[in-house]
Amino acid sequence: MVTAVILLRVARDRIGGIAEALADMEGVSEVFSVSGRYDLVAIARVGSNDDLAELVTGRMLKIEGIQDTETMLAFRAYSRHDLEGMFAIGFGE
């Protein structure tokens, strides 16, 4: 499984529509509107790097109003849930 964080700059008047279109795409698990240099952040979870390439360059960039993207591959996931699980195994008991 390949997980990627995709940062998007989009036309300001199309943020909501683009966010909905992205959220409906296969391979996109979450879309957030954000503050800062980017307008939207999409989390993609796909089977392979080829699937990611198709998602970003084949499907996302065909959506009118997406001006620029930056894609970051996730190497390892860390979450509060994972950390709690580590500490629950005999630590502090």
Image (spheres, rainbow, N blue to C red):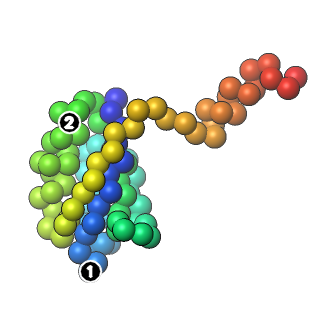
Q: Is residue 1 above or below residue 36?
A: above
Mark yes or no: residue 17 visible. Answer: no
Residue displayed at 20% across by 48% down: 56
Residue 40: image quadrant is bottom left
**Residue sitting at 18 percent across and 41 percent down?**
53
- Farthest top residue in view: 90
**Which three-letter amino acid code belongs to the residue tagged 1?**
Asp
Give the residue at the far bottom of this rendering. 13
Left or right: where 49 falls relative to 45: left
Earlier sequence position, callout 1 versus callout 2: 1
Q: Quadrant of the N terminus?
A: top left
**Mark on residue 13?**
1
Residue 84 can be seen, yes or no: yes
Residue indicated by mark 2:
51
Q: Quadrant of the C terminus?
A: top right
- The correct choice, above or below, for 87 with respect to 54 in the image is above
Q: Label 1, label 2: how many angstroms apart (C-alpha)?
A: 29 Å
Task: Tell me residue 60's x, y (percent).
Answer: 19, 54
Query: Where residue 21 sits in the image (x, y, percent)?
Result: 25, 61
